[in-house]
Amino acid sequence: MSSTACCYGDNDRERKLRKVKRAARSELSNSKGDWYKHGYAQSDICNTAGIEDHIPRIYWKDLSREEFVERFERPRIPVVITGLADDWPASKNWTPDRLRHLYGEHKFKVGSDDEGYAVRLPMAWYFDYMSDPLHGGRDDSPLYIFDGTFADREGSKSMRKDYEVPFYFQEDLFRYVGEKRRPPYRWLVMGPARSGSGLHIDPLATSAWNTLLAGKKRWALLPPGTPRCHVLPREQGVEREAVSWFSTVYLRAKKADWPTAQVVDLLQAPGETVFIPGGWWHAVLNLDDTLAVTQNYVSGANFERVWKHTRKGRPKMSQRWLGALEQERPELAAKAHDLTNREDLECDTGSSSDSSSSSSDSSESSDSESSSVSNTRQRAGSDAKTRVQACTSECKETFKA
Ligand SMILES: O=C(O)CCC(=O)C(=O)O
Ligand SMILES: [Fe+2]
C-alpha cells in the first residue's frame, strides 16, 4: 500500500503530527530520537526467513459452520480460513488511493493519551506518516490505526458496508446488551512495517476473527493457561510494543529451556482470516503496509467462559446482558444462572474445583481489572499505556535473555 508522495515540509502539519505522536506515546517523547533509538527499521525484524507456519488453511467452502464449531471453535484451536473476503467490496475498493479520496479528511484513532482520550489523525495524514522516512518509515514501532468506532462515526461508517461478518461468526451474543452499551467489538486496523499489537489476550475471554486485506502480518500465539509472568515479564527492555516483544520474549520462547508452552508461528497473507479462540495469547507484527478488519464475538461455544469473565469484570453490564438473554435466549440465561450459582457455592465452601476459571483468572486474563473491552484493546494495541500485572507467586522465576 504505497501512498502518494508527501513530505512534511509544511511546518504547521509537522508540528501537529509531533503533537499527536507525543500525546499517543508520551513515554517516547523525552528526547529527540526516542522514537527510533532501537534502530528496528534497519534491523531484520520483518524478515520471516526460517519462521515455520503450521496452522492449517481451510477454504471456506470446505468448512461448514458445524465443522468449524466442532473442529476449531469448541476445542479452541486457531485456524486460518481462506476465501471469505473474496467478494467483499473492501477487497477491491480499499486501495490507498480510494481510501485517501473517500476518507482522507476523516480522523481515525491512532492511540490514546495519558488520560485515556483517543488520539486521532486524518487518514490522509496517516498515509503520509506511514511512508515518511522521518516518521513511520523510521519509527521503531510506528503509530497504528486501531479504530473501534469507524463503523459508528459519520465520516467512516460507510466502510462497514464493504465487508461482511463471515458466517462462522455471526451469532454475536453481546448484541443483546444493545449497540450503545455492548463492549467495543469491531476495529479497522491499518499500519506499516513494525507497527502491531503487543502480546495480549482478548478481553472478556471473547474470540476473534481478523481478515487481512493488504500486506502481511506475523503472529505469535501461546495457548490458554500460559503464565503471564513468563510471556510478559516485568523487566526493563521488555515493552508491550509488538516489535519489542518479538525482539525479546519471543526469542527466549524459542530456546530449549523455555519453561512453558511453545509459541505457535503464523504468517498471514492478504485474503486470509485468522480465527483466535478466546484465552489465547497473541502478538502481531505488521511486516509491511497492512490493512485489516477484526471483530470479537461471543457464541454458544465460548459463552460460558465469557459469562464468567463478564460477570466479574463488567458486573453491571453482565446483569443487563442476563436480563436480555432471559427474554431472547432463555436456555443461555439458564446456563448463566447455573454457572453463577456454582461459582457462588464454590466461594462459600472455599472449593476451587473449576481449574479453568482459576487458571484464567490468574494467568489468562486481565478482565477483572479492566473497565472495558476497549481499554483492554487499547492496552493490547500499539499504545503502550499498559499496567502490567504482577506475577503470581508460583511464577516468580526470572529469565535471562
Ligand atoms: O491485527 C492486529 O494488530 C491484531 C489485532 C488484535 O489482536 C486485536 O484486535 O485484539
Ligand atoms: Fe487480539
Image (spheres, helix red, strand yellow):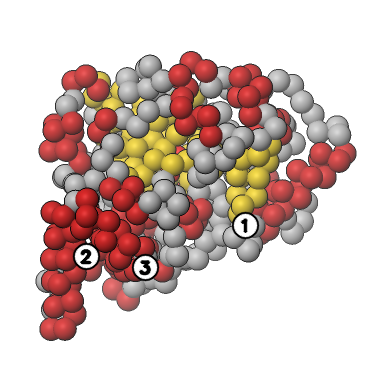
Q: Position of residue 73 (x, y in %)?
A: 20, 41
- Give the mark toward the camera: 2 or 1: 1
Q: Quadrant of the C terminus?
A: bottom left
Q: Position of residue 357 (x, y in %)?
A: 21, 65
Question: What residue did someone put label 1 on?
Answer: 117
Quadrant holding the N terminus: top right
Counting other residues with Cα less than 10 Å from the Cα at mark 2, is it few (<14), some (14-19), or many (20 or more)?
Answer: some
Q: Is residue 206 visible?
A: no
Asked whether 48 or 335 is in front, the reply is 335
| On screen, residue 150 above or below 181 | above
Q: How many C-alpha atoms fall within 10 Å of the one at disc 1: few (<14), some, or many (≥20)?
A: few
Which badge, 3 or 1, is on the more N-terminal residue? 1
- Seen in the picture, residue 46 relative to 313 is either above or below; the reply is above
Assess disc 3: are there few (<14), some (14-19) or many (≥20) residues with their C-alpha within 10 Å of its C-alpha. few
- Spatial CA distance of label 3 from label 2 is 20 Å
Residue 322 in sight here: yes
Question: Which residue sits at x=27%, y=56%?
Answer: 324
Which residue is found at the position 77% from the left and 26% from the top? 6
The residue at which mark 2 appears reads as: 357
**Percent x, y for residue 176?**
31, 51
Residues at marks 3 and 1, CA–CA distance in whole angstroms: 23 Å
Q: Secondary structure at mark 3?
A: helix
- Relative to 136, say whether 270 is above or below: above
Q: Amino acid at mark 1?
A: Tyr
Pointer 3: what residue? 316
Indicate if the residue with disc 2 has its beta carbon within 8 Å of ligand 2.
Answer: no
Extreme-bottom residue of the structure:
349
Residue at image x 60%, y 44%? 109
Please identify, in this view, whether the residue under mark 3 or under mark 2 is nearer the observer.
3
Q: Amino acid at mark 3?
A: Lys
